[in-house]
Amino acid sequence: MKVLVTGGAGFIGSAVVRRAISDRGYSVVNVDVLTYAANLANLASVDQDERYSFEQVDIRDGEALEQVFRRHDPDAVMHLAAESHVDRSIEGPLAFVDTNIMGTATLLQAARAHYDSLRTERKEAFRFHHISTDEVYGALGPTGFFTETTRYAPNSPYASSKASSDMLVRAWGKTYKLPVVISNCSNNYGPFQFPEKLIPVVILKALAGETIPVYGDGSNVRDWLYVDDHAEALLTILERGRLGEIYNVGGDAEVSNLDLVKQICKIIDQELDRKTPSEDLIKFVTDRPGHDFRYAIDADKIKSELGWTPSVTVEQGIAETVRWYLENRDWWQAIQARGHQQERIGLTKGTGA
């Protein structure tokens, strides 16, 4: 099988590309425009493989996408390209509208044209898998879980842009009979995550002995999903998911932000044999505007229908992630050398550009 993966140089996308090639033996076409969060170093283990191809293309460029489809003739599409950082979406929402909504629509049109050109037997096997987020469902209180039938109620510009892209994919499936499937995941973490998200921010701040910011009182709860478990789930959905369906993918690992930060600090102290607790670096800061209180996913559907379950506990995954950042300093130091300083953004002071 040849799979076209958008956003394949990103955090989750690169995990999918690596697993698709090394575990499944698939050929992969990585379509990525290489924004600030993309990193081709994430693909060093496969970039010399004859089954790997890279196209530096913007998903908003319909003509370029059509050329990619003609050149590579893929059997499936996995759409992961997106602007994804909530704080950035608060500061500059229009970039999220442009990429996540218009980019998805442009990609759908190119995929539709390709699908219409296929012979019958290849049409029957073709899939367009759209990868989304549990944030489209809004926020939960202390109890309950998101299911595939939960009403969409996005609260951030990022979540709204992803909800809109989900609806576009659904429409192309219903109106144009494009064979689509959608998945919504909980918070991912693991190796190669760009250091603007919570876990790598905490790790690198603690390593540097800098203040570790915790939004609000740290009581917000997230369900954490190890990225390699997610990549396996996504490939399973591509291969065996029912067309037109939604599959929620969660890690069965609810943790409050404060408890998670403290867990990371303890692991770092153990790994580095620190005498002064890294927890002393924690500082509570102004909360994110519209900060959703809790996300939690009911993943029974993918478990019962497709046989996927998370294999990594949050305790195992956090320990492995901390060790990876300790052992791969060149990776994140190169990002810092490009000017990324993990500064606080997203306090509604942006212009919306």
Image (cartoon, rainbow, N blue to C red):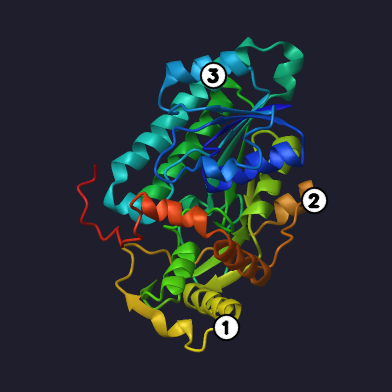
Which residue extends farthest front? Answer: 330
Q: Nearer the viewer, mark 2 or mark 1?
A: 1
Secondary structure under tag 3 reads helix
**Alpha-carbon neighbours of circle 3 within 10 Å: few (<14), some, or many (≥20)?**
some
Type of amino acid at the residue the image marks with label 3: Val
Numbered mark located on residue 149 in the image: none
Quarter of the view holding residue 177: top right
The residue wearing badge 1 is: 273
Tell me, yes or no, whether the two marked residues, 1 and 3, touch with CB atoms within 8 Å.
no
Numbered mark located on residue 68 in the image: 3
Type of amino acid at the residue the image marks with label 2: Gly
User: Viewer-proximal residue, 334 or 158?
Assistant: 334
Between disc 1 and disc 3, whose residue precedes? 3
Residue 285 place in picture, x, y as percent: 31, 74
Tell me, yes or no, whether the two marked residues, 3 and 2, touch with CB atoms within 8 Å.
no
Q: Residue at x 29, y 40 (%)?
A: 94
Kindly report the distance in space between the C-alpha atoms of the residues bearing marks 2 and 1. Answer: 41 Å
The residue wearing badge 2 is: 307
Between disc 3 and disc 2, whose residue precedes? 3
Between disc 2 and disc 1, whose residue precedes? 1
**Alpha-carbon neighbours of circle 1 within 10 Å: few (<14), some, or many (≥20)?**
few
Type of amino acid at the residue the image marks with label 1: Asp
Q: Nearer the viewer, mark 1 or mark 3?
A: 1
Residue 299 place in picture, x, y as percent: 67, 56
